[in-house]
């Protein structure tokens, strides 16, 4: 029916690139006294997207999330989550979000199952679905054997997994994960990512997460690099890397000089080092076969280097994200202080 | 930029978005209440300590003062102070149950609650009912000491006492929640509560008759909300005892104010007003966004 199509058109066009937006943030500001934690950030997250906020300590990631979750009032600017304004319709927003906080928010005097039941009631999970869902999320995070144990007997990583399970319990429209993998071992971290991606595939959940880890940010569809309360770059991981620089392909050949001249003749930008020929190209991996063919000499070693998000962060902020910052598990004191914000 | 609100996930019940759903709110109250009880049962030290103090008061005050005050027509000071001690145990348990809010804040669980799509009132009511239930049970268990003191109990009296205990507990738990929602640290809560609790208990008539006090003391007792909960309790307990007129005159009940003595229902009414105010203040202070 043509009439319906024309009516539907403007709505679709209003969403950037024809997507349905799950999160819309425009010029969001948060000041705590004189501290300006967030200085006017704007971004959109499409439905079903995995979106990462990447930035160092104190960049304003948690503050941004808190405003989106209606836990902090924006000083200025607007934000909509699931189509609802965080300031004017906080309850409607809350109905649609799941949240894993940076700090632990479990009751450690309750068992894993009791924590989940509490959550199920508060988030109105239909009663006949509660048991099945608790089983499912506990299996997801491999804690089904510990369901009757007090959370106080859990290790830090297990507690973290339980929190992630709880965030998924009610199948939110948007799931916020504030540094979800802090304190998890590499296997668990990988498992968690499988879960997160499955959640997106199976349930169409939109995921907005923050992280310090460059390698984690690469799982995201798009990344916003945030520094000192401002977004300094926003794009897909690949596009960000492309902005920073080209791939380099390093060929160690039997005759580097000859290879270099042939490659140059074929139009490649290249440089002959002492040991190897370095070729600057886009999408190095797919080019390797072609480059070897052009070189026409025996190749003993090939090394493709793509810029990493570390390079990206360095490029945009002039600083390196220290990897060790992400490793700490918040201590009790830090957690307590953070909980009071 | 504005897009149409997204539909809820198909399995979430389709409800109006901003409007609360009474069933869900009631279940929230029930869940918060249940959690308070589970936590109480799991902390044995808390159970023990909330018994020890009132019993200590009963024996020290009761037996110590009885020798000093003497016996009037066979009615001892122990009997006079017994309802006061029951009230004290309720008041202390009720007020300190609110400490769980400060704990929840310190351990982050408060956030899990305040970000949930439920109304703050339900959370506060659940908390308050949880603390009140514990306090009421606590006070009622104190009644086993009644025969030891020589206080006569009937089924009707026990029912009346439980009702009054519950009212007292709700009022003081909401007072505790109101204070706790404004306090960030456990230590601060304990200090503030000790500072408030002792005057509230000592100036409530729990330990001495309210009649014939110096004016300044009389004024303070009349400003104290606890006074309006202790006196009804003592009235119903005394009404069930065979009290000689001399004893009734010596250990008098009733709160006199502006030349008249308040009726039992007036006292309860005043306490209900205090309770409503505390509850409202507790809701306002609970889980405000930053
Ligand atoms: N409640 C608060 N009161 C005062 N200042 C605050 C408060 N919360 C955050 N800030 C400040 O805002 C800034 C951003 O903090 P935020 O917690 O958002 O950083 P973050 O990006 O999450 O850092 P991290 O990686 O350490 O978690 C910091 O300078 C912090 O000190
Ligand atoms: Mg943070």
Image (cartoon, grey):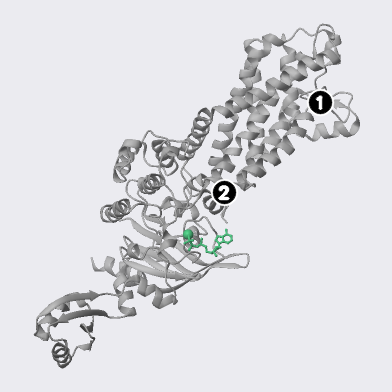
Left or right position of A260 against A231: left
Q: Is residue A49 left or right of residue B41?
A: left
Query: Split into 4 quadrants, where in the image is the N terminus of chain B?
Result: bottom left
Q: Above or below — where is B219 with respect to A236?
A: above
Residue at numbered disc 1: B255
Dot 1 alpha-carbon crowd within 10 angstroms: few under 14, some 14 to 19, many 20 or more:
many
The residue nearer to you, when weighing A183 against B228, is: A183
Residue highlighted by disc 2: B287
Q: Residue at x 54, y 43 (%)?
A: B104
- The CA distance from mark 1 to mark 2 is 37 Å
Residue in the foreground of this view, choosing between B54 and B117? B54
Task: Indicate the secondary structure of the residue bearing disc 2.
Answer: loop
Residue B88 in the image: state x and y as whole percent: 70, 26
Residue A93: % across, % down: 45, 55
* Residue at image point 32% right, 68% down: A12
Residue B289 location (% of width, % of height): 56, 54
Residue at mark 1: chain: B
Nearest to the observer: residue A269 or residue A31: A269
Q: Which mark is residue B222?
A: none
1 vs 2, front mark: 2
Q: Tell me, yes or no, if residue B169 can be seen here.
A: yes
């Amino acid at each position: 029916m043509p009439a319906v199509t024309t009516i539907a058109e403007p709505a679709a066009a209003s969403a950037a690139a024809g997507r349905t937006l799950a999160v819309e943030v425009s010029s969001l500001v948060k000041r705590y006294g004189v501290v300006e934690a967030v200085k006017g950030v704007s971004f959109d997250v499409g439905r079903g997207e995995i979106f990462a906020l990447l930035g160092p300590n104190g960049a304003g990631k948690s503050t941004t999330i808190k405003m989106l979750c209606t836990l902090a009032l924006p000083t200025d600017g607007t934000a909509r989550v699931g189509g609802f304004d965080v300031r004017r319709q906080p309850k409607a927003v809350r109905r649609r979000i799941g949240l894993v906080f940076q700090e632990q928010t479990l009751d450690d005097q309750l068992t894993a199952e009791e924590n989940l039941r509490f959550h199920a009631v508060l988030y109105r999970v239909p009663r006949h679905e509660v048991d099945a869902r608790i089983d499912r999320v506990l299996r997801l995070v491999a804690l089904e054997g510990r369901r009757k144990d007090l959370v106080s007997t859990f290790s830090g990583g297990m507690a973290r997994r339980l929190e992630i399970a709880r965030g998924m319990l009610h199948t939110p429209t948007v799931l916020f994960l504030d540094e979800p993998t802090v304190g998890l071992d590499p296997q668990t971290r990988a498992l968690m990512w499988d879960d997160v991606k499955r959640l997106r595939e199976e349930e169409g959940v939109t995921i907005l997460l923050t992280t310090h880890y460059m390698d984690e940010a690469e799982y995201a569809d798009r990344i916003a690099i945030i520094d000192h309360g401002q977004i300094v770059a926003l794009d897909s991981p690949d596009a960000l890397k492309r902005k920073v620089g080209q791939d380099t392909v390093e060929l160690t050949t039997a005759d580097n000089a000859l290879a270099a001249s042939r490659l140059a003749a074929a139009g490649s930008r290249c440089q002959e080092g002492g040991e190897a020929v370095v070729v600057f190209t886009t999408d190095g991996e797919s080019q390797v076969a072609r480059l070897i063919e052009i070189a026409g000499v025996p190749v003993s070693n090939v090394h493709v280097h793509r810029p990493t998000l570390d390079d990206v962060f360095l490029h945009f902020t002039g600083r390196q994200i220290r990897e060790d910052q992400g490793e700490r598990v918040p201590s009790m004191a830090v957690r307590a202080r953070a909980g009071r914000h | 930029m504005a897009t149409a609100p997204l539909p809820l996930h198909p399995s979430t019940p389709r409800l109006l978005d901003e409007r609360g759903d009474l069933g869900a709110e009631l279940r929230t109250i029930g869940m918060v209440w249940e959690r308070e009880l589970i936590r109480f049962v799991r902390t044995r030290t808390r159970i023990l300590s909330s018994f020890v103090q009132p019993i200590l008061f009963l024996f020290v005050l009761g037996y110590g003062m009885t020798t000093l005050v003497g016996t009037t027509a066979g009615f001892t000071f122990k009997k006079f102070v017994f309802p006061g001690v029951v009230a004290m145990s309720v008041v202390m348990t009720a007020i300190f149950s609110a400490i769980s809010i400060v704990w929840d804040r310190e351990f982050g669980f408060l956030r899990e609650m305040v970000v949930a799509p439920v109304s703050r009132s339900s959370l506060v009511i659940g908390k308050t009912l949880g603390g009140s239930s514990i306090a009421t049970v606590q006070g009622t268990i104190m009644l086993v000491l009644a025969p030891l003191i020589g206080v006569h109990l009937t089924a009707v009296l026990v029912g009346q006492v439980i009702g009054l205990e519950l009212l007292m507990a709700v009022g003081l738990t909401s007072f505790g929640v109101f204070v706790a929602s404004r306090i960030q640290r456990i230590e601060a809560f304990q200090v503030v509560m000790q500072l408030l609790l002792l005057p509230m208990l000592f100036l409530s008539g729990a330990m001495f008759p309210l009649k014939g006090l110096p004016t300044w003391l009389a004024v303070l007792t009349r400003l104290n909300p606890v006074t309006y909960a202790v006196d009804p309790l003592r009235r119903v307990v005394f009404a069930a005892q065979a009290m000689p007129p001399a004893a009734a005159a010596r250990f008098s009940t009733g709160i006199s104010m502006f030349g008249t003595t308040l009726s039992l229902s007036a006292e309860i009414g005043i306490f209900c007003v205090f309770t409503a105010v505390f509850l409202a203040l507790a809701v306002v202070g609970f889980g405000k966004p930053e």
